[in-house]
Image: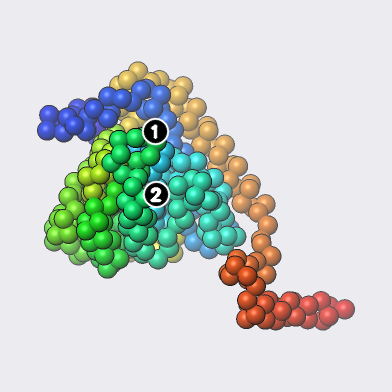
Amino acid sequence: MLSPDGVFEVPSEYAHYGKYIDKLTLDDFLKFYRDMARIRRFDNECTALQRQGQMGLWVPAVGQEAAQIGSGYAVGKNDHMFPSYREHGVAITHGIDLMSIIKMMRGVNHGGWNPEETRFHLYAIVLGTQVLHAAGYAMGVNFDGNVGTGDPEVDQAVITYFGDGATAEGDVSEALLFAAVNKSPLVFFCQNNQWAISSPVSAQTVVPLYLRGEGFGVPGIQVDGNDVLACYAVTAKHMDDARNGLGPSLIEALTYRVGAHTTSDDPSKYRPQEETDYWIARDPITRFEKFLRRQGVGDDFFQEVAQAGDDLATQIREATFAMPNPPLENIFKHVYTDPHPLVQEQLAWLENYESSFEEDSK
């Protein structure tokens, strides 16, 4: 829908997607841009904090902002989201405190938000597991009868996020099967960022990933993952279809992981710079800025967003450096509903071990 120069046009064969853009206002467009710029500033700051020893690991999403912000805002108020470990952009579209993500990566907690309240479930670190979780949840939505009633206060859909590398996991194939057989209200959102750590997508599949679902009876579509408006429209349409009882679908968003897989990775060792430069020239934020300028948005807005990003980075940095480490005994809490003798025994051992240092210091 958006050319690299920011020209907006909906081809006639995709008019059924264009109607979702027609409902958006300039304020919506500005919100999309603010959040894309905000999450990139947050992302870059977190990479710097990890390099300074403030986190054990960081998983950047630079380059994938359009896919995440666009699809995130297409999720309805009753819908549930099951992310992988890279969906920082989706998180902010649903009010997740960014410091909660840092705390998780720092090891302070295992995910500091309530999925029941936010409908944004916890990050899945193990590749592909969240896709099965989403399939199970969507089956439950079906069993509860919260699909296809025509009542927007009742009908629900589920969306799960994963990358091209995860499509090689059996969990994804199993989830596609269960979703198809049960006609579950589930949208599979695959961010094809071209690399599964150091494996290019050409080494992972010989057919486009959006066709992967057809063998299971799950229809698919491929979308420009660097076009925030296209990602919004396509996701909104398929979430509507899911809520209306039309079953699951698969969206492949073609995008690019500009940075490393994680901060423990060096992409320059395996990825040609020419390829990265090609995608940087198609940067989703730059593209959307060009679109907004065509709508008459001036420099003041972009300067305001840049300043807000700098302020956010300062807040994040100060809060991270001031963050206390949790008590070590917390690892024994919330393991079982009731106290377990083995866990209590381990806690007693730890307390005795820690007290030995106090005795040695006397």
Q: Quadrant of residue 126?
A: bottom left
Residue at 63 percent across and 76 percent down: it is: 340
Q: Which residue is mark 2?
A: 81
Q: Which residue is mark 1?
A: 32
Q: Earlier in the sequence, mark 2 or mark 1?
A: 1
Residue 194, placed above or below residue 157: below
Which percent across, then down, holds residue 108?
60, 60
Measure the C-alpha gap from mark 2 to mark 1: 19 Å
Task: Name the kind of residue labelled 2 in the image.
Answer: Met
Which percent across, then down, holds residue 127?
36, 64
Q: Quadrant of residue 28?
A: top left
Residue at 25 percent across and 37 percent down: it is: 237
Q: Nearer the viewer, residue 193 or 103?
A: 103
Residue 117, placed above or below residue 174: above
Q: Nearer the viewer, residue 329 or 293?
A: 329
Residue at 45 percent across and 57 percent down: it is: 123
Residue at 42 percent across and 38 percent down: it is: 77
Total numbered circles: 2
SS for dot 2? strand
As drawn, the label of residue 86 is: none
